[in-house]
Amino acid sequence: MCHCENNEQCDNTSGECSSGCAKGWFGPGCQYRDIAVEGASDSYSATDGDPTTCYETQAMDKPVWKIKLNAIETITEIYIITKADKLQYFMNFEVLVRNTTTKKKELCYRHTNIAPKSEKFSVLCDNRIVGNQVKIKLTRSQTQLIICDIKINGGRNLAFKGEVSQVSEHKDCKRTCTAEKAVDGHNNSLAWRECSYTPDEHNPWWEVDLGIDALIRSIQVVTYKDNKHNYDIEIKNSENVSYFIRGVRIAQTSVNISVNAIGRFVKMTKEWGRIGICEIYVYGDCQEDTCGYDCQKSCHCRDATIWDKISTNCSSGCKDRWKGFQCNIDTTTDCESGRYGEKCPTQCSKNCRGNQHGFCRSSDGRCFGGCNAGWKGNKCDQECFAGEYGINCKESCSDYCKGGVAKCDRTYGYCLSGCIPGWNGSRCDKACDEGYYGQNCSTKCSDYCHGGKAYCNKVDGNCKHGCMDGWKGPLCDQACSSGRYGYSCGYKCSQQCDKQECNNIDGRCTSGCIPGWTGEKCGKSVYSFNLKYFIATV
């Protein structure tokens, strides 16, 4: 998702913004979040996005510039603009990162004793460092630190338009407030129909599939104004290895969570209630040695910047063993990445995980990272058997798919023809809620099941313990026929009821009594009553 100035549309082919990037964004397609823009720094002129305004010190010994970020972040890359005639001052300069909570300070980067080649340059941390304070420090005496612009890479949103699923659909969300609303790029936390909702139930969940194992650096969750609760977040990679963040408290309408994990699936859960997400942002980037907007290309770049990542042009050259414009040709076999065998005649399986043409061993085609969902085997050339799905076919399909496991999608486990009666959810793994039954759990149980709706069969709606007084039929949806009442309609109305009509529940005569009779059920003779009165008065 590009973030152009004044909300202008980016180029459909290149993704670039002709008008420049909106405030807080930079890089190819203006997709990368700048976490320096809202920080508290030594000078606003270094973070205002205008390279014509600069932070400048006097000539002094080892001058510094620092910034405190709004949150704990994973720091990996910093983009700096200075003045061309001051580049020599940046020889041996350092970037330091500090976590003010733990008081831990680490060296992110140390430059060589050669000045940068251009007034615009990026530096990469030797390791991913978690902190909230960044310091630029010159290491020589009588030097002048000039920073005209600085941007700290906060990653790009990998969740945008991702494949989503959730426990089941809220009954009020037929075409609105669906699971997709959480990744549509709009974070309106005041309009509930623009958010994603699950029903109120035990252990609800919502999940997004990023499509690839990516480096996840932070997650921002925006919820509706009345949906402030504790959540658990699970980040799972394609090998089903999970990283958990438990007890995430969303006290306001949004929360930022610092993460340093490799994952493909991001799942939110809670113990009880509903999950309402107006937008979820999963900030990160491709893993090392993968490039492109979709992280589906091989590129073994040395010190890959975000521009290298997107363009696949390795500006600092290739890692050892690799060559080519994109650093994707293995010098040990001369095979371009994605091919194998003597003289490289064969293309790796497109089902190798991590690449559109596959990451595989150049000698025999074995997929390095396993298979994409729905496939298995050393070369990922065997489709999952019926009843299996997921990464390396490790998951089992639901027994409640309509048409059996043969109708289960082998990639995600979705039931292609829906569920058999009594079950719902995209994977048919959730029984109908209490009070509902049948196909898609769309039919309400009768209000007249004996013992309540809990005793309504979720498959066919039959009332397990019969009906309340006054009702009959397997579904308890038929009132007693005229002239009958009570449990299972087993009693006849009194013959003394006028027209022999009575209340179907308790037998009271609804049209009164025939002459000579009285009482709610017309069971008392008027003559008998008068005779007793006569005898008593004699």
Image: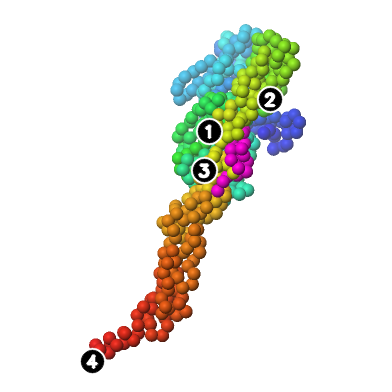
- Say the numbered circle drawn on residue 70: none
Evaluate if marks 1 and 4 touch, with contact meaning CB atoms under 8 Å apart.
Answer: no
| Nearer to the camera, 410 or 4 | 410
Among all residues in the image, which is located at the extreme bottom? Answer: 538
| Nearer to the camera, 171 or 109 | 171
Q: Is residue 356 left or right of residue 141?
A: right
Q: Residue at x 67, y 28 (%)?
A: 294
Q: Secondary structure at mark 4?
A: loop
Q: Residue at x 51, y 32 (%)?
A: 234
- Say the numbered circle drawn on residue 350: 2
In the image, residue 64 sits, relative to residue 271, either above or below, namely: above
Q: Secondary structure at mark 2?
A: loop
Q: Residue at x 48, y 35 (%)?
A: 232
Label 4 Cα crowd, 10 Å radius (few <14 / some 14-19 / many 20+): few
Quarter of the image holding residue 23?
A: top right
Mark 1 or mark 3, which is nearer to you? 3
- The first of marks 1 and 3 along the sequence is 1
- The first of marks 3 and 4 along the sequence is 3
Q: Where is mark 1, residue-wise?
A: 256
- Does residue 49 appear in the picture of this structure? no
Q: Main secondary structure of the magenta part?
A: loop
Label 1 Cα crowd, 10 Å radius (few <14 / some 14-19 / many 20+): some
Evaluate if marks 3 and 4 touch, with contact meaning CB atoms under 8 Å apart.
Answer: no
- Say the numbered circle drawn on residue 430: 3
Q: Which residues are magenta?
A: 403-421
Q: Where is mark 4, residue-wise?
A: 538
Type of amino acid at the residue the image marks with label 3: Lys
Quarter of the image holding residue 425?
A: top right
- The first of marks 4 and 2 along the sequence is 2
In the image, residue 533 lies at what x, y percent? 28, 87
